[in-house]
Image (cartoon, rainbow, N blue to C red):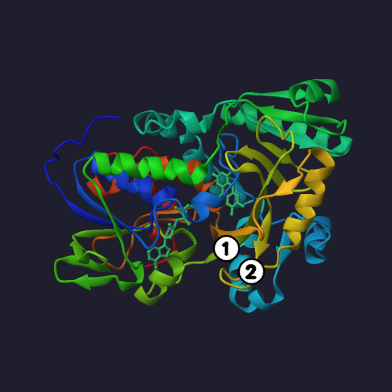
Amino acid sequence: MPQPSAVASTKTILVLGAGMVGTCTALHLAQRGHQVVLVDRRSPGEETSYGNAGIIQREAVEPYPFPRDIARVLRVAFKRGIDTNWHLSAMPVIGPRLARYWYNSSPARYPGHAKAYGNLVAQSISEHAPLIEAAGAGDLVRRDGYLWIYREQASMDKAMANAARIAGANGLRYQVLGPDALATAEPSLRRRLPGAIEWLDPWSVTDPGELVARYAALFVKLGGRIVSGDALTLKQASSGWSVQTDDGAVAAEHVVVALGPWADTLIRPLGYTLPLFVKRGYHRHYTGGTGPARALLDADRGLVIAPMKRGVRITTGAEFALRDAPSTPWQMDGAEAAARELVDLPTPVEAQPWRGARPCVADMVPVVGAAPKHAGLWFNFGHAHQGFTMGPASGRLLAELIDGDAPMVDPAPYSPARFGG
Ligand SMILES: Cc1cc2nc3c(=O)[nH]c(=O)nc-3n(C[C@H](O)[C@H](O)[C@H](O)COP(=O)(O)OP(=O)(O)OC[C@H]3O[C@@H](n4cnc5c(N)ncnc54)[C@H](O)[C@@H]3O)c2cc1C
């Protein structure tokens, strides 16, 4: 990564939120020579970007649609699987947004949204790679792909057809592992399974929060400042924006909202009613056993088993709930039981599972670009299931837009203006 260069017009920029998305945005802006202050109430990478499965999912070029087939809808409605949970109490608030999610998942609309999503995911490895090198974070990264394992022959058959389609359309590398090849590739598996799709392009990270912290340290090395403060104190001033921090008021011409699942809390009072919601998720670590050598998706149960520094991390699927509603971790209990059928997980590390929230948008496309009603206000959030993957590409795209440079991808599908002025 090049050193910061003095640009023709150096700008002062506040970035609110030091998750993967905000930190990468700040890093790209600092690298362009701007004076950037990254504001968070916690240290970088301690929220959603800490608790995920840590996979840089180059294969995830298609976002999760809202289920449209009746069998799957009924399965979710009656909570028949551990992959999805929902809170009835949340429906008055998120129901209309989920209806738009359903609408955008129709066969006519989904392909366009998926293309926009996939265009950022396509730049994930190529954008993470220089940052990992410049941040000296290679020790956190495994470059050995991602195994999607299948318990049922019927789902394995479907997965093979799906992998061939996705790989063919997107230039992705994969191989099909039958029962013997899977047992050899992953000797920790306790059961003989029908098989797996081994995606060869993804990387995985053994401490996701630490990767963000290393990117943040690189940002400081490039001249950036990190301060502790509350983003909700943001005020528009005559010359731009200002926010209260532990270092006093910090003012800048531009401000980037990169608050992940908290973005709605800040932008709604500013007049932006975007169709945002969260899919919550849980994780827990386990030590003492012979865990898998690399990240596994238990596709038929909807959980991930990821070897990490703190132990084997089991992450759950989606919970449709209000962001701050009390935890209902039955998916975690189910995921633990399901994972134990496959691998040895003797000792839980945490007394209670960690809980986080994937920041989602009803059309499945992240919101990246200029806020239509305020000069100098920029958005970068809504990366759903793959914000850890997309952070560097999304950060670069927003930095290019702020500078008025040619963007790396067509920015129109990500524009906040798509929801109206
Ligand atoms: C269980 C689970 C597994 C996942 N697995 C993967 C995966 O394998 N790969 C992948 O790509 N993605 C994965 N994701 C999704 C990914 O974690 C998110 O998309 C991503 O972390 C979002 O990053 P962010 O920077 O937008 O948000 P965050 O990381 O949440 O950052 C937002 C920041 O805003 C700060 N903030 C909030 N409010 C304020 C305030 N008032 N003042 C100051 N600061 C504030 C927070 O402290 C936080 O640091 C997973 C998510 C979950 C829940």
Q: Say whether marks 2 and 1 touch (CB < 8 Å).
A: yes
Residue at left offset 25%, top offset 39%: 221
Q: Which three-letter amino acid code belongs to the residue tagged 1?
A: Val
In this rendering, does residue 164 appear at all?
no
In this rendering, does residue 289 appear at all?
yes
Residue 206, by quadrant, is top right
Image quadrant for the N terminus? Answer: top left
Q: Which residue is mark 1?
A: 278
Above or below 171: residue 241: below
Residue at left offset 52%, top offset 66%: 275
Residue 95, by quadrant, is bottom right
Give how far across and how far down residue 278 sits, in percent.
57, 63
181 sits to left or right of 356? right
Give how far across and how far down residue 126 sits, in percent.
44, 30
Mark sitting on residue 321: 2
Cα separation, mark 2 vs mark 1, equals: 7 Å
